[in-house]
Amino acid sequence: MAENLARVLERIERAASRAGRRPGDITLIGVSKTHSGAQIRELYEAGVRHFGENRVQEWESKLTSLADLDATWHLVGHLQSNKVARAVRLFHTIDSVDSMALAERLERAKTEFTTEATEGTEKNETSRGVAPGERVRVLLEVRLDPTATKSGASDNELPRLVEAVLRLPHLELRGLMGVPPYFEDAEKVRPYFRHLRELRNALLVQLGGEILPALSMGMSHDFEVAIEEGATEIRVGTALFGERKKD
């Protein structure tokens, strides 16, 4: 695991150098879907501090054995509406908000969580993620893959969604996330990463201020291109953990 991490960090450094960026400005998220708590701990001990899970239920099954780790836990997969209440208690950041309906559910769930904690009714075992008094960090998922089954907000929906989420008091909007189509040749993904960056830059001009600093894009096979196109967070599973077990 430490050797895998060293190789990934070397790739990050080379890509950042080509782009004239600092490697330290890029957050490495170890995507631990289907991997064991022991493997997560091993990678944590090697130096990784951000981890991403795709499913609320799977993370709950690992939580007890990892509660002592001072890590940041990301939900990077699609969030079902019936899992929202659990998600705001278990994750520091929800990186896949793709609709106003989901954002409003998160807002209501976080309000209820904060109220319960204030009234002393919240049990300790349900709050190993974000603290009740903190806002939930969120990223908006943008649909980069035109395939109909893919989640994510459309380009046209995005400005209204950004403005609406910025008004929700219990959510902290920090940026955009996108998953492009898969290509063996990573260079073919470049236009999709560039498009996400340009969308973010257009929103900065439209809305002003220092909003949306985070761009979460790039995975094991294409994160160098994502870094060259401005990624601040990369989501890496296979290159760190090895091949996943089949579901």
Image (spheres, helix red, strand yellow):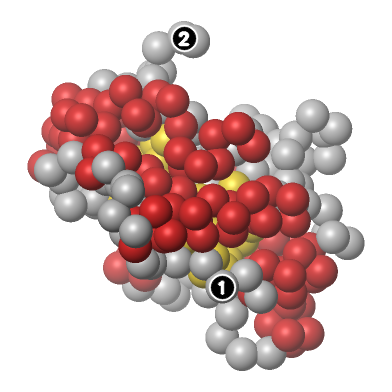
**Which residue sits furthest bottom?**
209
Q: Nearer the viewer, mark 2 or mark 1?
A: 1
Residue drawn at point x = 12 percent, y = 43 percent: 68
Q: Position of residue 207 (x, y in %)?
A: 73, 85
Label 2, on which residue? 246
Q: Position of residue 180 (x, y in %)?
A: 68, 43
In the rendered structure, the answer to whether residue 203 lies left or right of residue 13 reads right
Label 1, on which residue? 169
Estimate how packed mark 1 is, as few (under 14), some (14 to 19) or many (20 or more) residues with alpha carbons within 10 Å: few
Residue drawn at point x = 23 percent, y = 44 percent: 124
Q: Residue 61 appears in which quarter of the rendering?
A: top left
Q: Position of residue 45 (x, y in %)?
A: 11, 42
Estimate how packed mark 2 is, as few (under 14), some (14 to 19) or many (20 or more) residues with alpha carbons within 10 Å: few
Q: Position of residue 189 (x, y in %)?
A: 67, 46
Q: Look at the image and tell me whether residue 9 can be seen.
A: no
Residue drawn at point x = 20 percent, y = 30 percent: 64
Q: Kindly report the distance in space between the C-alpha atoms of the residues bearing marks 2 and 1.
A: 40 Å
In the rendered structure, the answer to whether residue 239 lies left or right of residue 217 reads left
